Image (cartoon, rainbow, N blue to C red):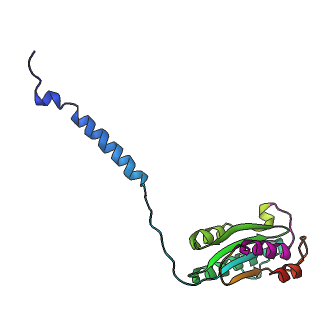
């Protein structure tokens, strides 16, 4: 029937403090980030879509020790680095065309996607060079663009030998 001492009442406090510290430590390691910040980009830019050939012929070692594709990727990376207010998209093509990235200001992601591009022979996709398909896919990306200037940059080493769209037809559509 004796009253409980302060020491007896607070005996669970060290365990509770340890638990709180552990929870806070787990939260700190998780590095939660909250951001409602928007970045306003001021300037007048161009919407650009790069159409890159990944056909088997791009494996030629004209640029020792790099092949044509790696040399093109290096040039594109430098091009992206020099842009400031331009939205850049990326299309790859061989026998078919594939959208890698819609036009974006996120140059870091674009450069990462560029680094992941492989030759068609490494991907196990049917080989060929469908220049018209690549240009048509790039044009489709720019179709809804509201930019005053829209540009398609074609990077290829060969002649059109595949695809349903003739390069001249794609060029006229552009």
When asked about the image quadrant of residue 63, the answer is: bottom right
- The percent coordinates of residue 36 (x first, y second) are 45, 63
Question: Residue 135 magenta-drawn?
Answer: yes
Q: Is residue 65 visible?
A: no
Q: Nearer the viewer, residue 121 or 106?
A: 106
- The percent coordinates of residue 24 (x first, y second) are 34, 47
User: Is 105 left, or right, of 96 in this rendering?
Assistant: left
Residue at 66% x, 84% y is: 148
User: Is 113 left, or right, of 58 in this rendering?
Assistant: left
Residue at 19% x, 30% y is: 11
Residue at 91% x, 75% y is: 161
In the displayed image of the protein, which residue is found farthest to the top?
1
Image: magenta residue range:
124-144
Q: Quadrant of the C terminus?
A: bottom right
Question: Residue 54 magenta-drawn?
Answer: no
Residue at 42% x, 54% y is: 32
Total labels: the figure holds 0
- The percent coordinates of residue 110 (x first, y second) are 62, 71
């Amino acid at each position: 029937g004796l009253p409980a001492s302060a020491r007896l009442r607070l005996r669970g406090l060290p365990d509770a403090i340890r638990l709180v510290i552990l929870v806070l430590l787990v939260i700190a390691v998780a590095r939660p980030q909250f951001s409602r910040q928007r970045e306003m980009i001021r300037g007048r830019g161009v919407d650009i879509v790069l159409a890159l050939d990944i056909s088997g012929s791009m494996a030629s070692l004209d640029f020792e020790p790099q092949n044509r594709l790696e040399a093109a990727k290096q040039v594109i990376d430098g091009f992206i680095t020099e842009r400031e207010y331009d939205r850049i998209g990326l299309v790859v093509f061989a026998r078919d065309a594939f959208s890698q990235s819609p036009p974006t200001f996120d140059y870091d992601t674009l450069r990462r996607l560029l680094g992941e591009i492989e030759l068609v022979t490494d991907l196990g996709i049917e080989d060929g060079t469908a220049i018209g398909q690549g240009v048509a896919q790039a044009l489709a990306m720019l179709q809804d663009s509201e930019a005053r200037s829209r540009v398609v940059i074609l990077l290829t080493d060969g002649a059109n030998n595949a695809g349903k769209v003739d390069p001249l037809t794609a060029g006229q559509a552009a």
